[in-house]
Image (spheres, rainbow, N blue to C red):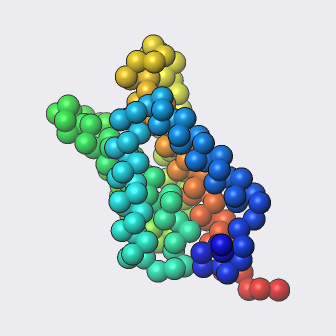
């Protein structure tokens, strides 16, 4: 097995990270149920489409793109089903639009701006989760929001680091 696009075998750290991510996702899915299913399916679809459409040099940013677009589509669907028209609509607009910008022009500026937005939203979601009952539907949804925001931050950083590492000439 090789690292796609590099021709190198995956490192122990990469394998351990993949296993830890899979375990965390399984536990999150067990707790959250449908709240994770919808953004996961949307993220998979967005990631698959991006893999088919973007050039190989932008592929390290696909996971970050997919998580943010999947998250944004989940929020948009929830707001539409609840017929909510409020400032909450900014969240999916920024996530989906920012994700599109991130995959079209990956780099430090979109990562920094989306990262700042995700950190602000993470702070707000953390404040909200402290005010709800553990185990209730709102708590389960907020756990998914927080997990997706943390994942997006980590994946943007990893994607940016990978792209920069690949752009350096071999020594």
Number of marks drawn: 0
**What residue appears at the point 45 percent right and 13 percent down from the top-left corner?**
133
x%, y% of residue 52?
A: 39, 75
Out of 92 and 69, give the one closest to the viewer: 69
Q: Quadrant of the N terminus?
A: bottom right
Q: In this orientation, which residue lies closer to the viewer: 102 or 10?
A: 10
Q: Which of 91/68 is in front?
A: 68
Residue 107 in the image: state x and y as whole percent: 55, 68
Q: Report x, y in % for residue 68.
A: 43, 52
Q: Quadrant of residue 112?
A: bottom right
Residue 22 seen anywhere in this rendered image of the structure: yes
Q: Is residue 74 left or right of residue 16?
A: left
Which one is in front, 8 or 67?
8
Name which quarter of the figure residue 81 lies in: top left
Who's the residue at 52% across and 18% down the image?
Answer: 130
**Outermost residue, right direction?**
171
Which residue of the protein is positioned furthest toward the front in this rendering?
Answer: 1
Question: Vertically, is 60 above or below 169?
Answer: above
Residue 83, position in %: x, y? 17, 33
Side of 76 where 159 appears, left or right: right
Q: Is residue 150 above or below residue 98?
A: above
Name the residue located 25 percent from the left edge and 42 percent from the top edge.
Answer: 77
Residue 146 seen in the current view: no
**Residue in the picture at 72% in, 81% down:** 168
């Amino acid at each position: 097995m090789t690292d796609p696009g590099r021709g190198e075998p995956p490192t122990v750290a990469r394998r351990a990270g993949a296993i830890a991510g899979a375990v965390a996702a399984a536990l999150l899915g067990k707790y959250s149920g449908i709240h994770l299913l919808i953004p996961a399916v949307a993220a998979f679809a967005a990631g698959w489409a991006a893999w088919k459409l973007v050039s190989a040099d932008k592929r390290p940013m696909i996971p970050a793109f997919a998580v943010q677009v999947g998250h944004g589509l989940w929020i948009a669907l929830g707001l539409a089903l609840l017929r909510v028209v409020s400032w909450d609509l900014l969240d999916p607009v920024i996530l989906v639009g920012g994700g599109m910008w991130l995959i079209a022009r990956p780099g430090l500026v979109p990562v920094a701006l989306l990262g700042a937005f995700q950190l602000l939203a993470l702070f707000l979601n953390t404040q909200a989760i402290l005010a709800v009952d553990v185990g209730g539907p709102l708590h389960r949804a907020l756990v998914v929001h927080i997990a997706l925001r943390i994942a997006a931050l980590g994946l943007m950083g990893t994607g940016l680091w990978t792209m920069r590492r690949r752009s350096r000439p071999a020594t």
